[in-house]
Amino acid sequence: MSDEFAIQQVLNTYTYNATIGDLPAMVATFAPDGVWEVPGAGIEMTGHDAILAAAKGITGVLEYMTQMNSPAIIQVDGDRATAKSVIRECGKYTGRELHLEVLGAYEDELVRLPEGWRFARRRFSTIGMHDYTTAPPALRGG
């Protein structure tokens, strides 16, 4: 398997597990000392425990969330790599007829560990964030 394919799989694994709510599996895509950064929100966490706690806090207000990531622009330099990708997240707030859409970009630094590629640093920049009301039942077919 090429390094580029393996790195794209790390991005896909992160997105899939975030979408199905398997936050420990999502966090496992980070190196043990990996950093998850959201500068626009003043968030920077280091290490699996801190990243997991933050992810639980962010997703805890949502009934569900989905992420859709684009194929990444990946550059490999030995045991280090960078990846740039865009993402769309959609979710529904728990107990409210209100949805969330987040559009953004990731700038990632990855490191090759014995178990494979992992995020050394994952930096998310928000491009846009929108709340919108749930479609009326007649439009949803219900």
Image (cartoon, rainbow, N blue to C red):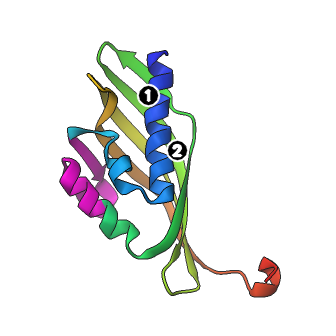
At horizontal 51% and vertical 32% (from top left) the residue drawn is 72
Instruction: Looking at the image, tell me whether mark 2 or mark 1 is earlier in sequence order.
Output: 1
At horizontal 82% and vertical 79% (from top left) the residue drawn is 141
Dot 2: few (<14), some (14–19), or many (≥20) neighbours within 10 Å? Answer: some
Place of residue 9 in the rendered image (x, y in percent of width and height, measured from the top left): 48, 32
Dot 1: few (<14), some (14–19), or many (≥20) neighbours within 10 Å? Answer: many
Is residue 60 in view?
yes
Place of residue 20 in the rendered image (x, y in percent of width and height, measured from the top left): 50, 57
Which residue lies under the disc numbered 2? 86
Which residue lies under the disc numbered 1? 7
The amino acid type, in three-letter code, at marker 1 is Ile
In what element is the residue under mark 2? strand
Q: Nearer the viewer, mark 2 or mark 1?
A: 1
Q: Which residues are magenta?
A: 33-54
Residue 56 magenta-drawn?
no
Place of residue 4 in the rendered image (x, y in percent of width and height, measured from the top left): 48, 21
Q: Compute the Cα span from label 2 to label 1.
A: 15 Å
Is 99 displayed left or right of 13 in the figure? Answer: right
The amino acid type, in three-letter code, at marker 2 is Val
Q: Which mark is residue 131?
A: none
Q: Outermost residue toward the top?
A: 78
Is 99 displayed left or right of 123 in the figure? Answer: right
